[in-house]
Image (cartoon, helix red, strand yellow):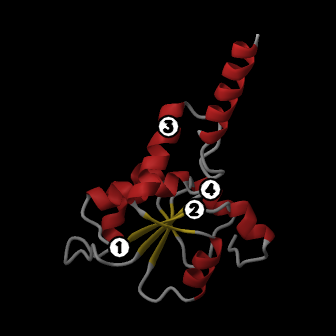
Amino acid sequence: MNRLFTASIFVAIAMALSVPSPAVAQNFPLSVTQKIQAAQKQVKTIGLEEYRKVVESPGEALIIDVREPQEFAAGHVPGAVNIPRGLVEFQIWKQVGFPAKPDTNRPVYLQCQNGNRASLAAQSLAELGFTNTTAVVMSFDEWQQAGHPLVK
């Protein structure tokens, strides 16, 4: 009886320690969660407050919303360009000056609903040679609730 109780406690603790961050904790198979977590370890990430500063003063930065067009149309941050996650590797080039002189060093901020798609997109762009990509890991709902600017 004591062994069963001890084993149950050990399993419960192990499960609690393996819960992913809130940005990743969704109803996905473990392999998807692990892929997102690995991407977030490989790319630069920022949260809501840092992103607010970028949106307020983007300078040369390119802000890409990788959500689907209908999500983008429902509301997006000012200055964002919509390139869905499934097309980002193909459509980014026009935004950075291809075919004339593509600038793969330009700061690129990738944003989605919660950071998952943005993290995967940032990882893909890094693999294509982009050197200054940042994934925004935040809840877009929190952005709206905080009263930050939104374009519809």
Q: Secondary structure at mark 3?
A: helix
Residue identifier under label 2: 137
Q: Of the residues shown, which amino acid type is indicated by label 1?
A: Asn
Label 3, residues with CA under 10 Å away: few <14, some 14-19, many ≥20: some
Alpha carbons under labels 2 and 1: distance apart: 16 Å
Q: Residue at x 29, y 77 (%)?
A: 105
The answer to whether marks 4 and 2 mark residues whose Cβ atoms lie closer than 8 Å is yes
Which of 35/102 is in front?
A: 35
Alpha carbons under labels 4 and 3: distance apart: 15 Å
The reply, left or right, for residue 56 in relation to residue 88 is: right
Residue identifier under label 3: 32
Q: Would you identify the image quadrant in which residue 133 lies?
A: bottom left
Number of callouts: 4
Label 2, residues with CA under 10 Å away: few <14, some 14-19, many ≥20: many
Residue identifier under label 1: 132
The answer to whether marks 2 and 3 mark residues whose Cβ atoms lie closer than 8 Å is no
